[in-house]
Amino acid sequence: MYCIVDIETTGGSNKSGRITEIAAFLHDGAKCVDKFVSLVNPRQPIPPFVANLTGISNEMVAEAPSFEDLAEEIYRFMANSIFVGHNVNFDYGFLREEFRRVGLEFRRKKLCTVQLSRNTFPGLPSYSLGKISRELDISHEDHHRAESDARATMLLFERIVEKQSLHGLFDVNFGSTELTFTGSEFINREIIDSIPDECGVFSVLDRDDRTIFVKRSSELVNTIYDKFRAAETQTDRSFLEKAYRIDFQLTGSPLLAQLIEAHEVLERAPKFNQGRFSIKSQFGIFQDDAERGTFHLRRYQLGESPVAAFANFFEGLDFIKNQSEQKDLRLVETFRKRWKTEFALLNKFSDNTFALASLLPSDSYILIDEGVDVDHRSLIYVIEGHVKGYSQARKDDPFDMFDIEGMEHLFQPHAELALVVRQFMAKGKFEKKVGILN
C-alpha cells in the first residue's frame, strides 16, 4: 500500500515551521482506496507571503484541529504503507518532526516522484509538480493546496507505475527480489536489508579493515543500494571488488551525521570518496607569522590544518571582516596574490598588533537536535569555538544537566567541523542551542 501525501506549512524549516494543511491518498498500486484531508491549526502565525502563496490564512485555521489532535488518526491512516511525495523529504521531514513533538516515532519507507519521474520521463525541461503536470496533461488546478497537489502527485504516480520502465530505485522500493550486484562478492541484499533505513552514516571497509568509503544519508538503505547497484566506470568496479563489509551508525540528526562523515573522511581519507565530504572546505586561515601578527587566507589541500575553514574565498573574507568589526579591530591587508591574501590585525586606535586567536569565536555551547529515536536527543558540543564531540541524552533530561562531562564521543580537532556547524546554524537546521554549565 502507498500513501501519497502533500502538506502546506508556515515556512521551509521543519524545526521552526508547522503544518497548516495535510492531504493523503491511500493507493493500492492500481487505484485510490481512501483519502484524508484536513486544515491544521499550526499554533503560530502564518507569514503573509505564505498565506498569499497557499491561500491559507490565519482565520481559516483558527478553528481547525491542531496536529496533536489529528496525530493518532493520521498515524493509523498511514500505517503499513510506503510514503510517497513530490520532493518527498520535505513532506516526510515535517510529518516526522510533528509526530516527534507529540511523542510518536514515525518511520516509513519513502518514494519520491521527482526521482522516479526523472527516470520514467527523461529529458523534460522541469520536474516541478506544476510543470510536469502540464507536460503529461495531468489535472492540477489549485496549486499550493494540499489536496490538489496530493491528487496531482497520485496521478503522476499512476503514470509512473503504468510505464513499468524503471530499474534500480523503482525495483528496490517496490519490493523486487531481482536486484543483483555487479561486483561485490561479500555485500549482498540480506546484509543491506538488515540495516535500518534511517538517518546516519555508513562506512565500507576492505579485507584489511581499511575504510574505503564513507557517506551520510537520511535513508541509509536506499543510499547503500545506490552505491552498490551500478558499475559504470572502472572506479565503480574497483570499489565493488574491494568492498568487504559495511559498518553503520544511526544518528537521527542530519547535523551529527554530517559531522561524523566529515570527521571520518578527514581522519581516514577513504580511497573512494570523491573530494572530501559534501560541504567542500577549500579555503582556510593560517597563522603563517605569529611574531609579525600576520595570517593568510588561502586555498589549501587535504592534510593541511587551517585554524578556520571556509567553503570559498569570499566566505572567509566576509568572516574575517565581520569578526574584526565585532571586536573593534582594524584589518590591514599586507599582501595579495590570486586566492591568497595576507592580513594583520591592529587596534583601531593604535598600531598594536593582535594575535589571530582574538579573531576566532571562543564561545562554548551545546547544539541539541533529533536523537536516534523519539526518546533521545543528539548533543553536539562546541567548546571555545571548536567542535569537540557528541553524545545522546534522554528526551526528558533537563537542559541544566548538560555539561562537558556528558560528552561520550570525541572528535579530533578539524576546522572543517566548525564550518559544518556554522552553515547549519545559519539555516536554523537544529533544534536548540544552550550554554554549557561548567
Image: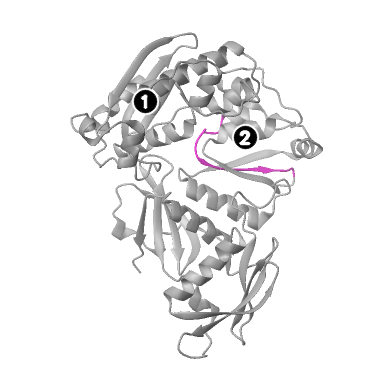
Instruction: Give 55 or 279, whichever is nearer the viewer.
Output: 55
Q: Label 1 vs label 2: CA separation?
A: 32 Å
Instruction: Give 230 or 220, whichever is nearer the viewer.
Output: 230
On the image, the x and y values in percent for residue 44 come to: 25, 42
Q: Earlier in the sequence, mark 1 or mark 2?
A: 1
Is residue 105 inside the magenta stretch?
no
Above/below status of 139 relative to 325: above
On the image, the x and y values in percent for residue 334 come to: 63, 81
Above/below status of 343 relative to 203: below
On the image, the x and y values in percent for residue 178 come to: 66, 17
Instruction: Give 254 or 398, whichever is nearer the viewer.
Output: 254
Badge 2: residue crowd in 10 Å (few <14, some 14–19, many ≥20) = many
Q: What kind of colouring is applied to the model shown?
A: one colour
Badge 1: residue crowd in 10 Å (few <14, some 14–19, many ≥20) = many
In this figure, which residue is indicated by the disc labeled 2? 224
Above/below status of 191 relative to 322: above
User: In what element is the residue under mark 2?
Assistant: helix
Direction from residue 209 to residue 358 in the image, left or right = left
In which image quadrant can residue 167 be found? top right
Please tell me which residue is depicted at 29% across the width and 36% down the height of the picture. 102
Q: How many marks?
A: 2
Answer yes or no: is residue 204 visible: yes
Above/below status of 350 relative to 126: below
**Which numbered disc covers residue 146?**
1
| Residue range highlighted in magenta | 194-207
Please tell me which residue is depicted at 52% across the width and 66% down the height of the picture. 318
Please tell me which residue is depicted at 43% across the width and 77% down the height of the picture. 327
On the image, the x and y values in percent for residue 193 come to: 58, 28
In which image quadrant can residue 142 be found? top left
